[in-house]
Image (cartoon, grey):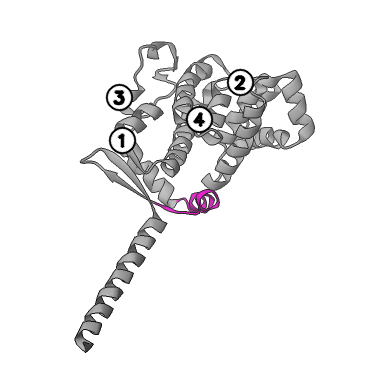
Amino acid sequence: MLIQNLINEKDNGGINRILQWFNKEYYRNTILTVCPWLLRYLVLAVVCLQQNLGQKIIQCEMIGSFLKKNSPIYKDPLTIFLYSLFNDCNFEEASKSLQECRKIFTIDLFLCNYCEIFFNQSRFLFFSKFVQINTEMSMEKIGFALMLDQYSQFEDDHAWWIGQQSVNDEPRDLIQWMIDAVYNLQEEKSFQQNEERNTKRNLTIQIDLAKKLLIATPKHVKIIKKQVENAKTQYLEAKEFYELLS
């Protein structure tokens, strides 16, 4: 009942408190020993908490590391999704676990009110991590991995519904979702700062609708390319000047 009350608190107060508990070793060890199944609500809290993307990624990495270390004690689709994505960079496993989360959100009454925001935020987190690792991605692969558009339809959809829609419902089509996601990533300064922390690079992301590809280009590659072009120009100018003197 305490967890239910915390989850249902307005303005993310309860979700914040769950994360605060986790940050205290005493509570963390107690949960792990006595009621490890509560770890799924920890994943819910960090994924659904309203904060900038950079800070959220850092927290997901920290919690994912803890969940992976203790996976022999407890794991479910939510916990596997988090550490597969942020600690293993196993996108196939993360996508599979996200699909399996549909069942969890249907049968767990404490979670059902958060299905929309959880799947929305999980997709965005997946996408933000995916573009850091991959430089060229097919839109079809992204749609399948994130259950978007026609790739959100499964044979067992009828079993995992809340009210009048599936728990993983996303009204936007694949192209519109990707356009919005790319725009949000480019606008998220904290993501760029966190990306520098991890990879020492920034990204320029483009959507090629003709080829149905998403292309992520590190900005430092463009800088190096420009420097090479400038050096080449200077060399040719110097060579031409030398020939004139000869």
For marks 4 and 1 on the same chain, the one whose residue lies earlier in the sequence: 4
For marks 1 and 3 on the same chain, the one whose residue lies earlier in the sequence: 1
Residue under label 3, please give it. Answer: 150
Q: Is 78 in the magenta?
A: no
Q: Amino acid at mark 1?
A: Ser
Residue under label 4, please give it. Answer: 118
Q: Are marks 3 and 2 in contact (CB under 8 Å)?
A: no
Q: Is 196 in the magenta?
A: yes
**Which one is nearer the viewer's eye here, 78 or 61?**
61
Q: Amino acid at mark 3?
A: Gln
The spot of residue 3 in percent (x, y) is 67, 24
Residue drawn 35% across the image and 59% down it: 222
Report how far apart the C-alphas of labels 3 and 2 lie in the structure: 29 Å
Residue drawn 25% across the image and 78% down it: 239
Q: Amino acid at mark 4?
A: Phe
Q: Are marks 1 and 2 in contact (CB under 8 Å)?
A: no
Magenta segment range?
Answer: 188-203
For marks 1 and 2 on the same chain, the one whose residue lies earlier in the sequence: 2
SS for callout 2:
loop
Residue under label 2, please give it. Answer: 75
On the picture, is 16 further left or further right than 165? right
